[in-house]
Amino acid sequence: MISAVKGMNDLFGKRAVRWGRMEEDIKLLVSNANFTEMRTPMVEEIALFKRGVGETTDVVQKEMYDFLDKKGRHIAMRPEGTASVVRAFIEHGIAMNEPMPFKVFYIGPFFRYERPQKGRYRQFHQLGIEILGDETAQMDAEMIFTAFRVLTHFKIDAEVHINSIGCKECRPAYREKLVEYFASKKEHLCEDCKTRINTNPLRLLDCKICDPKSKYKDIPVMTDHLCGACDDHFKQLQKSLAIFHVPYIIDPFIVRGLDYYTRTAFEVVANTGGSQNAVAGGGRYDNLVADIGGPDTPATGFAMGLERLFDLIPEDFYSESMLSAGYALCDEAVDDLVHFAKHMSHHPIRFFADYKPKKFKKALQKADKTGAAFMFIIGEDEVKEKKILMKNMKTGEQKVYGQHEVMIIVR
Ligand code: AMP
């Protein structure tokens, strides 16, 4: 038997209905904040992610789904959305042609070759928002507020963790401090971190394998080494988050896995105690557009994992819309049932017809199995009198109506 590729999921039935409604709600929320959708291809040249996400990141080094196409081009399935949005922003000259800031959102699948477990898949979905052309801390606060707003809409209890990871001016000196600090502790680091200490020392701060942050209490933190401008920006961010009523905690160990962040970095963690409780993350990336070859453009954004969001939505958040089912008890009744189905299609009612004639008892069983709230039956007598029998599946009550009369009742 051929099964789905490891770490990739099918979506159907009740879960698909809830998922669709979740996406509709999200789109409405972000559209109200003036984000418009941007759709980019599922694949890009791998060079984009190497440059955009960073050669030294796990995503690029270990997790890429990549292949050579028939012309030998090196292509990768997108592991995240920001690099593609930035590529499109540059390619279409958006900085020149659209009013700034340019605010977009995307919802769709992403691909990472990770070890699958609950909340971690090889094809997963993200909501992302990106705001290009604005350097203010207030915009970072709005961006974080948007992530928080999505969670509060779904009645999810979550915590926002923020940090500043500085800029080109202040980070190099801090980086040196970190390298110095860990130089004498190399033997206590995991294999990855022994390499990272030279390539990407900030990543030591959130390593889950050797976990230096729980072992050492005097690790230098970026927030103590910010330059004046970054310090002001971080203070303003906190002030604006307070105005937006977003509760936050400062967590100097939020460094984010991807290379492109500057200043603001944040994560949203659900208060569930589970291990995969990071729902969203992001921050500011003021150098990325220029690094990929575009005009100097400050930017900020986040990505939210939709599988994780979905699992956190309370069971009773969406009530199921009522289902009605229609059955014919004899061949003569089928045309009337077709008529009835056509009429029902004009109403916002979930209705399905089963055109294969069957005995009343069988129809009742089928209606029960599909979870119908109302069952409509057309038998020989009903055809003659242009009537229809409606049965309330919960109370068992049943009554005969004129076929046109019932249209008014169900509406
Ligand atoms: P990142 O793009 O790594 O910053 O991740 C942003 C969010 O996407 C995370 O907080 C998760 O909710 C989600 N996410 C990342 N990787 C996966 C994955 N492999 N499976 C499911 N969700 C993921």
Image (spheres, grey):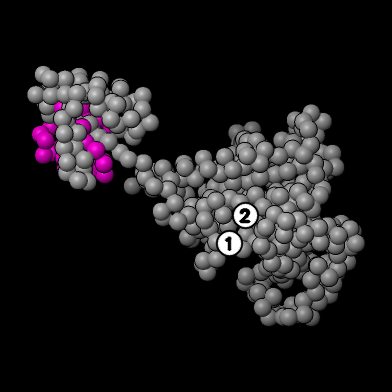
Q: Nearer the viewer, residue 25 or 275?
A: 25
- Identify residue type, mark 1: Ala
The image shows residue 289 at horizontal and vertical percentages of 79, 43
Which disc, if any, is residue 53?
none
- Identify residue type, mark 2: Phe
Q: Residue at x 56, y 44 (%)?
A: 26
Q: Residue at x 83, y 70 (%)?
A: 224
State which quarter of the image contains the C terminus: top left
Marks 2 and 1 sit apart, C-alpha to C-alpha, by 8 Å
Q: Can residue 54 be seen from the camera position used here?
A: no
Within 10 Å of the Cα at label 2, are there few (<14), some (14-19), or many (20+) other Cα atoms?
Answer: many
Q: Quadrant location of residue 321?
A: top left
Whether 365 is among the magenta residues is yes
The span shown in magenta is 352-378
The image shows residue 350 at horizontal and vertical percentages of 34, 34
Q: Which residue is mark 1?
A: 158
Q: Residue at x 49, y 57 (%)?
A: 312
Mark 1 residue's CB less than 8 Å from ligand 1: no
Q: Can residue 346 be seen from the camera position used here?
A: yes
Q: Which residue is mark 2?
A: 148
The reply, left or right, for residue 48 in relation to residue 380 is right
